[in-house]
């Protein structure tokens, strides 16, 4: 009992660390849609490139902001651990750690890249060239944040795009599982296909099934009871 | 069971199913933005209009007895036409309601939680904001303005 309680305490402590997760993206809106190719990004070296330039390999986008003290460091650390187990950034896929903070500057992302020893080639720390680019990208993946003093409340996630910049999968949380990421990348490469439009209806189909089964069971029970009454 | 009774029951069931499927269709098929409630944040204590970029705003709308605080006490704000505004709503005292005329923004302001919805103000004009939840003697005068130019 006591170890269980301790475990519970540990879990609540860990979840308290990351705080609120804000407004989740509406996957029904975004999955299967394409991110505009002409969004211009700037990497930590100050080099500009268009998202379309990265076509040909899946892209893992991790939205963060550089002055984040709670969730973003955990996200980046977890990606640092899991990415080498999945493949080589730049050869198998691209990784973009993307700052959504409109106040972040080139200095900030440079510092962030150095702090986490990110190579800046296959895995880039990037920002939007203009604020318009920034909001076009976060609107495309339906990422929303709320300002609280100098911090932001935001969902913790990474987005996986197909080599054609189609949004394929979201992974949630601050730590990512190797198999989960491999699966998302296979989905992005088109090795496994899920009908995207259908996915958002799954929950409702399940619910209708559940309700239908319960109604049928109630009907059966009712019939048996009535038969008994007749016999008596 | 009586025939009329049976008919009534079936009709009611069919109507319920139709309404339910319409809700599902509106949420998933029409891709309507659904209001969200954030319960695990500390609600803000004053209204604030934050400009993130051109035509890109974040509005912290604080409802209180008996006014809407849009921006540090201001009961009306000005934004350019075509602005996309992320509107967060909370209340400082009792439950209020926030309805922005001419939009589908209609959210309860509940103390302790933050309601959220995104609005794009396409047409210029004055958008009246009214409280639609009876909140005391000043309820009828509780209103604000969002001026879009």
Image: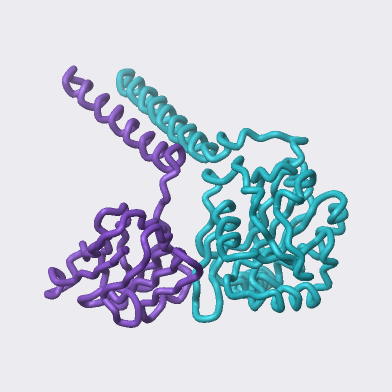
Chain colours: A cyan, B purple
Judge by depth and name the residue closer to the eye, A79 or B87: B87
Residue pictured at 60% horizontal, 60% vertical: A133
**Image x and y of residue B138, in percent:** 14, 75
Give me the residue at 70% from left, 72% from top: A73
Q: Nearer the viewer, residue A130 or A26?
A: A130
Of residues B146 and B28, the one nearer the viewer is B146
Q: How many labels does the image show?
A: 0
Vertical placement of residue B43 versus B134, above or below? below
Q: Which residue is drawn at 74% across and 51% down?
A: A59
Q: Quadrant of residue B3?
A: top left
* Side of A108 where B134 appears, left or right: left
Q: Give percent across and percent down for residue B99.
A: 26, 60
Image height of A204 relative to A107, above or below: above
Q: Is residue A78 visible?
A: no
Quadrant of the drawing holding the N terminus of chain B:
top left
Residue B142 in the figure: left or right of residue A31:
left
Residue B17 percent coordinates (x, y) = 34, 31
Quadrant, the C terminus of chain B: bottom left
Q: Can residue A144 be seen in this view?
A: yes
Does residue B4 appear to the left or right of A85 in the view shown?
A: left
Tell me residue A161's x, y (percent). 69, 47
Residue at 38% of width from left, 34% of height from top? B21
């Amino acid at each position: 009992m006591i170890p269980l309680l301790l475990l519970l305490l540990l879990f609540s402590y860990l979840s308290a660390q990351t705080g609120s997760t804000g407004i989740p993206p509406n996957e029904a809106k975004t999955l299967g849609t394409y991110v505009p190719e002409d969004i211009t990004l700037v990497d930590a070296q100050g080099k500009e490139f268009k998202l379309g330039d990265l076509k040909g390999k899946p892209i893992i986008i991790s939205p963060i902001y550089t002055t984040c003290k709670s969730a973003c460091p955990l996200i980046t650390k977890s990606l640092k651990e899991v990415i080498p187990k999945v493949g080589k950034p730049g050869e198998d896929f691209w990784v973009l750690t993307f700052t959504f903070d409109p106040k972040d500057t080139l200095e900030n992302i440079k510092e962030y890249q150095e702090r986490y020893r990110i190579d800046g080639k296959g895995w880039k720390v990037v920002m939007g060239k203009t604020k318009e680019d920034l909001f076009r990208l976060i609107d495309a993946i339906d990422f929303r944040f709320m300002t609280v003093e100098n911090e932001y409340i935001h969902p913790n996630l990474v987005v996986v795009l197909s080599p054609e910049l189609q949004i394929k999968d979201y992974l949630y949380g601050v730590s990512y599982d190797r198999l989960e990421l491999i699966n998302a990348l296979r989905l992005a490469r088109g090795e496994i296909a899920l009908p995207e439009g259908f996915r958002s209806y799954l929950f409702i189909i399940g619910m209708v099934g559940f309700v239908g089964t319960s109604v049928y069971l109630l009907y059966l029970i009712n019939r048996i009871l009535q038969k008994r009454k007749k016999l008596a | 069971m009586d025939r009329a009774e049976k008919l009534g029951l079936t009709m009611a069931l069919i109507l319920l199913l139709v309404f339910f499927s319409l809700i599902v269709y509106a949420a998933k098929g029409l891709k309507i933005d659904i209001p969200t409630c954030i319960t695990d944040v500390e609600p803000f204590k004053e209204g604030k209009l934050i400009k993130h970029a051109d035509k890109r705003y974040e509005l912290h709308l604080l409802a209180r007895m008996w006014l809407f605080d849009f921006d540090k006490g201001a009961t009306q704000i000005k934004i350019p036409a075509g602005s996309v505004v992320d509107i967060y709503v909370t209340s400082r005292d009792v439950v209020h309601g926030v309805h922005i005329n001419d939009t589908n923004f209609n959210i309860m302001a509940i103390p302790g939680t933050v309601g959220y919805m995104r609005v794009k103000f396409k047409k210029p004009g004055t958008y009246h904001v009214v409280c639609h939840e009876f909140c005391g003697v000043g309820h009828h005068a509780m209103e604000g303005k969002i001026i879009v130019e």
